[in-house]
Image (cartoon, rainbow, N blue to C red):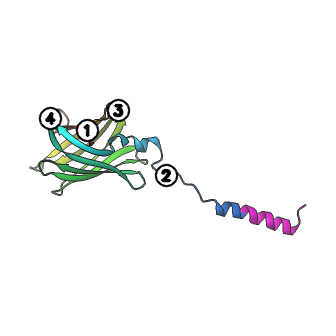
């Protein structure tokens, strides 16, 4: 049987062990799903055909849980987006805002080497437009972004933008 002094010493030692070691909480973006879009990270020159469409910077922020996009178009367009995996919905989200204040809010999934996000917006006439943007994780390190739109609830699609991302040297 331990004496009162030894019990107290043992209790204090155990208490010190638990208070000295910081609790290690797993980050909500530490799983593989939260990094499926990391292939898009970098400094890019974006081409539409053989012409430069603009530059894009994709950087991880907020402890790597969010990707922030900063687009600077060759024709004067500009915008920014926040991209993240929501563990509560198991979906990817992108919230995009253009220089003129219009927005695009999309959700989707990564599958078979492609990130596919979809969302609704309004055209200049105020009519609803469906948007589907696909980013292709190409083996050569480039990224293709294919943006399609539908004004007939997805029956037909037209290409709004088809660009090739190449890393800046």
Q: Residue at x 20, y 37 (%)?
A: 163
- Give the main secondary structure, helix, strand or loop, of the magenta stretch: helix
Observer able to see residue 133:
no
Indicate the quadrant where residue 20 lies: bottom right
Secondary structure of residue under mark 2: loop
Q: Around disc 1, counting alpha carbons within 10 Å, would you say few (fewer than 14), some (14 to 19), or many (20 or more)? A: some
Tally the numbered discs. 4
Q: Pointer 4: what residue? A: 50
Q: Around disc 3, counting alpha carbons within 10 Å, would you say few (fewer than 14), some (14 to 19), or many (20 or more)? A: some
Of the two numbered discs 3 and 2 on the same chain, state the one appearing first in sequence.
Answer: 2
- Where's residue 63, x and y in %? 43, 54
Magenta stretch containing residue 13, yes or no? yes
- What span is in magenta? 1-14
- Where's residue 141, x and y in %? 32, 35
- Where's residue 50, x and y in %? 14, 35
Q: Pointer 3: what residue? A: 113
Identify the mark at residue 27; answer none if there is no mark: 2
**In this rendering, which labeled residue sits more in front, label 1 or label 3?**
1
Picture layout, residue 160 above or below residue 84 = above
Q: Are marks 3 and 2 in contact (CB under 8 Å)?
A: no
**CA separation in Å, label 4 and label 2:** 42 Å
Indicate the quadrant where residue 108 lies: top left
**CA separation in Å, label 4 and label 3:** 24 Å
**In this rendering, which labeled residue sits more in front, label 4 or label 2?**
4
Secondary structure of residue under mark 1: strand
Q: Pointer 1: what residue? A: 166
């Amino acid at each position: 049987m331990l004496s009162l002094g030894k019990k107290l010493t043992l209790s204090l030692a155990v208490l010190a062990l638990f208070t000295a070691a910081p609790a290690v909480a797993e980050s909500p973006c530490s799983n593989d799903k939260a990094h499926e879009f990391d292939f898009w990270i970098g400094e890019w020159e974006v081409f539409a055909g053989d012409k430069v469409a603009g530059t894009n910077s994709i950087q991880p922020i907020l402890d790597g849980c969010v990707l922030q996009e900063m687009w600077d178009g060759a024709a004067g367009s500009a915008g920014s987006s926040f991209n993240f995996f929501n563990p509560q919905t198991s979906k990817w989200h992108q919230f995009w805002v253009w220089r003129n204040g219009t927005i695009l809010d999309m959700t989707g999934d990564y599958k078979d080497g492609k990130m596919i996000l979809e969302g609704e917006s309004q055209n200049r006439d105020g009519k609803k437009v469906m948007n589907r943007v696909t980013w292709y994780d190409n083996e050569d390190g480039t990224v293709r972004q294919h943006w399609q739109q539908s004004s007939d609830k997805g029956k037909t699609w037209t290409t709004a933008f088809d660009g090739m991302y190449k890393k800046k040297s």
